[in-house]
Image: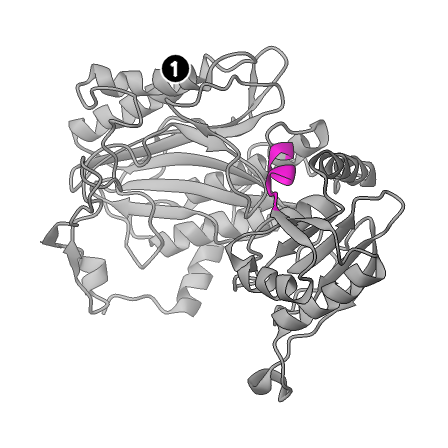
Amino acid sequence: MNIRPINTGARRLGSLLADFEPDFEFSAPLPLPIEEFEERLRRIRRQAVEAGHDAIIVHTGGVGWFHTSNAYLRYICDWMREGVLIIPTDADKELVLLSFFTQSVLLPPGGEPVLVDEIWQIGPIGREYADRPGDSIVKTAEKCTSILSNMGLTKAQIAKIGDRTSSTFWAALKELVPKSKFVADNGIIDRMQKVRSPCEIEMFRAAAQLISIGTQAAYHVAQPGVTDQEIYAAFTYAQLAFGGETGDGYQIGINEFGTHCGKPYGHIVRPGDLINLYISNVTYRGYTAQTARMIAIGNITQHQEDILAACIDGVRRAEKLIKPGVLMRDVNNAAFEPLIERGLLASPEARTMPYNWGPMPDGEARLVPRQYVENVDWEAQGRKLMHVYPATRGPHNPNLGHSVGMAGALNSFNISSHNYDRLEEGMVFVLHTQWLEPLSAGCNVGDCYVVTKDGFENLSRHTPLETFRVTEARREQ
């Protein structure tokens, strides 16, 4: 088998990155000031008053690999772990945090909670883990009930904010506090994240710079003979070394067809390969950025060149429209014009657009084509690729982009044909034009932007959008 031992790969990576330096100076902002969180709490409480809530309970679960299920607690009080935050609507009552109810071992700092008076450690328990009876989620609900009782909130209207991991906790709490009315109201927090403050934009700017540093490191090592794992590791090493928080929020796709949205598996770079760095999430102090770049190894087909040119042109056309007051729909549609002009698409309308992961035109499930696809590196590991991915040609998504926010947060808006909202100063989003034809050609390129008073700032400008070219024998721009 042609698999490089891990210790050899580590030594090789050190050699490949020995003379790497980013070509710009990284600007690392300090944590958000306490005043920023105080203003958020003021706005949260005001919205709660308007909705008739007596308190807000926010639940953030753990989803493994030391990740939380949502970003609500980090947004409200800068807490990086799982937890339940009790926010009385009355401004003279303190916030209370219940946490440490999973087996996560993360300890602050970073992430000492701000504005919180008391922290209660529930403890991960259970027969197998601690040889003690009980359930940590139920114990959390019991302690939450006790605190609500002490606050006089057992017959109250309470807003609940959480996600799909919260259902067991909500059910237990409802049973324990039957006389209170619980109202799902995630919108209180979600609405606040559509337009970003100047301090938040500093965080997005830093996250985008980390992406550029990682991308430059990937360019530095990309050449025939290296593996996708080494390129991925070079990107990861570089951005983490400058302050990135995680190393698993992005994809790398490499083959002769331009397939993107992959994870490294041991592919050895060869002439004719197209490499996509789809950076879906690099995080700095909880805030993320997103970009996409392409690398061509040696000569590629003319059709592949045409697809690369069309996608780059699409981002450039959309970018020209960015300024306050412009319809998001118009930005989206501009990016699809090059694909329509080349006869690849008939319309930019999301409802009618074919896309890589879409169902059949009537909405029914689509069968993924079963076909043997040669992949020598996968087969060297004793496996075979027996289906064609993606199942159909088209863009990866039926839209151009979406908001960029905190790690684990849902998009607050999409840049799409059916979005008639207007751009506002302080909005942060990614625009990525994508096209992929099974076993033929593919491209995914995009930049991260913030809307300014009279236009935009390209946060990912430190690496050009154009395809990075690598000759068979050496790297060149």
Q: Residue at x 16, y 37 (%)?
A: 440
Q: Quadrant of residue 202?
A: top right
Residue type at mark 1: give it.
Answer: Arg
Q: Is residue 392 magenta?
A: no
Residue at x 36%, y 15% (from the top left corner): 334
Determine the main secondary structure of the stretch shown in magenta.
helix
Considering every residue shown, the one lying at the far front of the view is 179
Image location of residue 312, percent across then percent down: 34, 23
Q: Which of 76/13 is in front?
A: 76
Residue lying at 70% horizontally and 27% vertically, measured from the top left: 198
Q: Quadrant of residue 338?
A: top left
x, y percent for residue 158: 69, 49
203 with respect to 254 (left or right): right
Residue 190 counted in the magenta span: yes
Residue at 72% in and 32% down: 199
Q: Position of residue 308 (x, y in %)?
A: 28, 27
Residue numbers of the magenta segment: 184-192
Q: Nearer the viewer, residue 444 or 158?
A: 158
Q: Which residue is mark 1?
A: 317
Secondary structure of the residue carrying tag 1 is helix
